[in-house]
Amino acid sequence: MSNRIADLTKEAVNKKVEHAAEIVLSRQAFIQQFSDIEDFVLRGPEVDAKAAAATEYNLRIIRSGLAGILWKNDVFIGIDVIDHILFGLISSGKTINIVPEFLKSIQHKGLHRTGFIVYPLHSFGVLGLGFYRFFKKSLPYMTIGNAGLSITAQTNSKERTFAFLDHVREVFAIKQKIPADSIEHFISSRPLRWIENNPLLAQRVRSFTGTYYENQFIYMLKLRMSTALLMMLSVMESRRTMDERLIHGSSAQVNNRQTLDIKHYLTFETPVGRRKSLTASCIPMMAGQLELALLSDLNVAVDPRVWSKPGAIKRLSSLQQTVTTVEKGYLNEVILVGGDSVRSRVHRKLIMSIDSYRRSFSAGVRDSEAIVSLAIAFETLLTDHYAPKVTERIIRRVRLCLKGIKGTRRFQRVVSQLFACRGAIVHQGSARMFSDLRIAQKVYVLCLQHVVSSLPRLPRQSGSPIANILGD
């Protein structure tokens, strides 16, 4: 681990961070008059204002560098926690090298260890987990290890919910136990009907927070991408026919008492020290009940048996890698860096496109709304800006994305029909029959995979980066 800390230190320490660390260490005597970071914040105006302002400015620079390197390595330590540890190291009075000492402290406290988040889903079905499960042995859960994702249909009992949580702990290789007493308390004191009545999604995440909401934007990004991955799996499954037994065997059709009263989600973090149980929190949705309900809208059915077959594992791995690349790119280029560079603009477009794609599956939309949402997803993905003949350009770029894939001509016709229906809906207020929405959703996935695989070709400067990477 010492070599890893050295590598991370090199990544975190640029000239700006290095200079800020030198200034802060030169002010250790000033910093030592404060008991902790809160005392510094509260008493700052009462002491040397110039020294306090300079210290705060440079602490922010160091904190930003530390947070950036942790988050780039999928360790989401909350800003509040970083502030406390950083201030404590500096106020110790010892001569220290701030960045490596901070990283060693994270390692020593175990804040980098794996935990997970549990989200409620609605409208989601697992094929084979309805009545059919009682007549034929089937998988009780679906786990995608590389994506750090595990799902279950509605458990309809507290005991089976606890069994699922314990399964998640085991497949994510977490040693600490599930804190059953905390979950019991949450159930009795909060509106958590969903914990038994709704499908559940567990997402592996290395996270440690000091306050309820500081990492919520990370959790919501992961929920957006995890549900998008499951939607992609649903349309990429190889099903010969829609077997009637599978339809009636779907968990979405049997014993389904799901609720949209969704106001919280659960987090399980590895505790500091040697405690034997995970630290559980029941987090209210700061953004509002409706937003979490929309993010949790997963109106698809997935057959875990299809994706457990050897021939499908490669396809699953490819889809998971595509989604992970988009998520990490958005985190690095938009959340951490920001600005209006070519890379940040393209990654913002990718996330916006995937969000529109997700809306095309929503249980709460009409067919016409699903068609428009999917058309927006294609246009956001495959164009750089508005120009005449946009539909022809999109079809041309679909052809470029699908080169070498069997059935390309049919797929192009489906996308052309999609945009014809979209035009009729938007401009004429009428909708033509469009029975190939599932195929169009599959074509989108194939195009997304091609675009994401082409991201290494993004130029530093360009007014038309999508055209550049597609060679159009």
Image (cartoon, grey):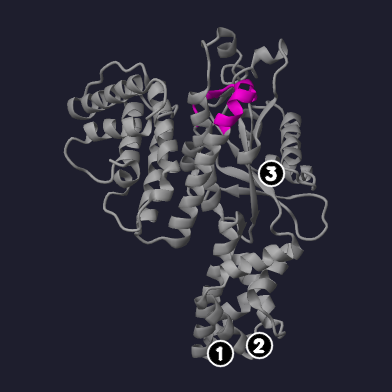
Q: Residue furthest front?
A: 404
**Mark 3 residue type:** Phe
Residue 145 occupies which quadrant of the picture? top right
**Mark 1 residue type:** Val
Q: Residue furthest top?
A: 244
Marks 2/3: CA–CA distance: 41 Å
Q: Which residues are magenta?
A: 298-316
Residue 377 occupies which quadrant of the picture? top left
Q: Earlier in the sequence, mark 1 or mark 3?
A: 1
Left or right placement of residue 34 versus residue 72 in this view? right
Q: Is residue 435 above or below residue 296?
A: above
At 32% from the left and 18% from the top, the residue drawn is: 434
Examine the structure image and report whether residue 299 is included in the region drawn in magenta.
yes
In the drawing, what numbered circle is on residue 33? 2
Q: Earlier in the sequence, mark 2 or mark 3?
A: 2
Dot 3: element: helix
In the drawing, what numbered circle is on residue 186? 3
Which of the image's four quarters has the C terminus? top left
Examine the structure image and report whether residue 101 is included in the region drawn in magenta.
no
Please name which of the two marks, 1 or 3, marks the residue nearer to the observer: 1
Asked whether the beta carbons under mark 2 and mark 3 sit within 8 Å of each other, the answer is: no
Asked whether the beta carbons under mark 2 and mark 1 sit within 8 Å of each other, the answer is: yes
Marks 2/1: CA–CA distance: 10 Å
Please name which of the two marks, 2 or 3, marks the residue nearer to the observer: 2
| Residue 49 position in % (x across, y down) | 50, 89
| Residue 341 position in % (x across, y down) | 35, 59
- Kindly identify which residue carries mark 1: 47
